[in-house]
Image (cartoon, rainbow, N blue to C red):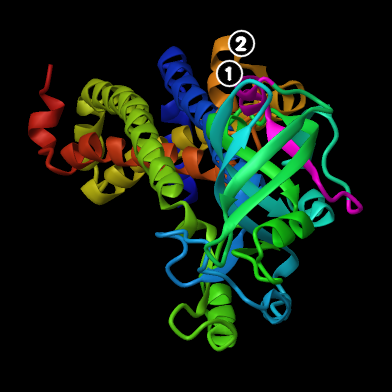
């Protein structure tokens, strides 16, 4: 085996230019895959985190059926035990309560419908990024009562600003009229049109009084230690809380994927499209390697014929050719990993500015206009390993041609 390695290494550098070009193609492709996979997967993580921290939580407890048909009377009548059941899970870090209802808002000159959400100010600060998107004024404080934070677009449509009063008219939990007035103390600009155009945040204590909730809420949001493998957690919580609500609408725990299934499906579709593009790139490299070894085998046909004539087995010749391809691919892969990781680490430090137009589009999904790749062992290895395997497999075709050679014909080849 040692002598085969020496022969393969010597043969590899017979044509230095061709070997260098092939190795460079493998290194470039492997390094590029490290960078683009790090960028792509980091953006997916950002999208998911933005959705979770922007209002849905990792897990939500709510009355059964509320997600598909949100009615004021579908509530969690006693959220305390529900929160306790969630916090029993080691992966759950914190919880917060929400109550919500669609209402008519009236400013000095205009009216508009909007979703009024009663929140616990400290819980919202700890849970997500809503408080961080306040661009004017401030977010709600624990001691606030009849105060409100509006989406910037909603405030513009109503013609109100900081310090102005907004009248809220809706339907209470018991079916009566819910009416009240709140003072605007802050404006949020999240970059998500549906939130900025039609959402109002008020203290939960005010919402409870005006909408006659009697301590009930519509959602209990929970923040976990990660995005993945939360289904067993939700199932255990559901088993604990089924008896804590109303019999015809018992509480259930839903994961973020159940709350916004389209988000993950969209990411899967985007990733499949990206895999197709990456496959085309890898196939181009594969054909380059195939061409390299087809030419190498063709140029050495007479040499192979002589070696078989003096007793070298076809299997050993195939092994030598595969060793050549393996070493070429391995060195190219190693170089690509080093270069790819170095470039990715540098880009992760400085970021990539997507520009104003792309930045405005990305803001709709809660993403920053400057993106940063996240280098992980997965992104550093998967792409280069695929390139390595495809390169070795591409060399298998000309290697098997060697096995079918006949010594006499090979020696007399042109």
The residue sitting at the right extreme is 143
Q: Which residue is mark 1?
A: 360
Q: Is residue 144 magenta?
A: yes
Q: Which residue is mark 2?
A: 356
* Residues packed near mark 2 inside 10 Å, few (<14), some (14 to 19) or many (20 plus): few
Question: Horizontal placement of 69 versus 87: left or right?
Answer: left
Q: From the top left corner, tell me how far across and down residue 413 is, in percent.
A: 11, 22
Q: Are marks 1 and 2 in contact (CB under 8 Å)?
A: yes
What span is in magenta?
A: 142-159
Q: Is 91 rendered above or below residue 111?
A: below
Residue 81, labelled with which disc? none
Q: Nearer the viewer, residue 261 or 204?
A: 204
Nearest to the observer: residue 269 or residue 197 = 197
Q: Position of residue 78 (x, y in %)?
A: 67, 78
Visible in this render: residue 371?
no
Q: Is residue 247 left or right of residue 197?
A: left
**How far is disc 1 from disc 2 in space, using C-alphas?**
6 Å
Q: From the viewer's perspective, is residue 185 above or below residue 242?
A: above
Q: Nearer the viewer, residue 59 or 46?
A: 59
- Is 57 left or right of 320, judged from the image as shown? right
Give percent across and percent down for residue 1.
45, 52
Identify the residue at horizontal 55%, vertical 68% (top origin).
62
């Amino acid at each position: 085996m040692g002598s085969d390695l020496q022969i393969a290494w010597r043969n590899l550098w017979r044509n230095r230019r061709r070997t260098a070009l092939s190795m460079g193609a493998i290194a470039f492709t492997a390094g590029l895959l490290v960078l683009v996979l790090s960028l792509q997967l980091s953006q997916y993580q950002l999208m998911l985190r933005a959705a979770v921290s922007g209002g849905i939580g990792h897990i939500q407890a709510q009355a059964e059926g509320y997600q598909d048909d949100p009615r004021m009377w579908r509530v969690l009548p006693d959220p305390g035990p529900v929160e306790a059941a969630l916090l029993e899970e080691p992966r759950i870090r914190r919880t917060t309560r929400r109550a919500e209802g669609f209402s008519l808002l009236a400013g000095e000159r205009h009216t508009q419908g909007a979703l009024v959400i009663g929140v616990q100010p400290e819980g919202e600060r700890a849970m997500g990024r809503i408080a961080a998107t306040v661009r004017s004024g401030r977010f709600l404080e624990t001691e606030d009562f009849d105060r409100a934070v509006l989406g910037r677009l909603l405030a513009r449509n109503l013609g109100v600003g900081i310090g102005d009063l907004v009248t809220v008219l809706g339907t209470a939990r018991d079916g009566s009229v819910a009416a009240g007035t709140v003072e605007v103390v802050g404006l949020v600009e999240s970059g998500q049109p549906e939130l900025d155009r039609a959402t109002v945040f008020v203290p939960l204590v005010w919402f409870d009084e005006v909408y006659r909730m009697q301590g009930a809420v519509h959602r209990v949001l929970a923040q976990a230690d990660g995005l993945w493998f939360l289904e067993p957690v939700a199932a255990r919580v559901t088993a604990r809380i089924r008896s804590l609500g109303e019999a015809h609408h018992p509480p259930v725990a839903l994961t973020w994927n159940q709350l916004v299934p389209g988000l993950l499906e969209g990411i899967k579709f985007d990733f499949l499209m990206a895999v197709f593009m990456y496959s085309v790139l890898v196939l181009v490299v594969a054909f380059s390697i195939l061409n390299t070894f087809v030419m190498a085998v063709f140029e050495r046909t007479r040499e192979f014929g002589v070696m078989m004539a003096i007793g070298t087995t076809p299997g050993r010749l195939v092994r030598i050719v595969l060793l050549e391809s393996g070493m070429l691919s391995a060195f190219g892969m190693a170089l690509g990993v080093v270069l790819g990781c170095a470039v990715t680490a540098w880009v992760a430090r400085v970021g990539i500015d997507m520009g104003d137009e792309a930045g405005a589009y990305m803001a709709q999904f809660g993403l920053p206009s400057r993106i940063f790749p996240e280098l992980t062992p997965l992104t550093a290895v998967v792409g280069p390993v695929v390139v390595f395997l495809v390169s070795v497999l591409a060399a298998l075709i000309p290697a098997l041609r060697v096995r079918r050679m006949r010594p006499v014909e090979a020696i007399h080849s042109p």
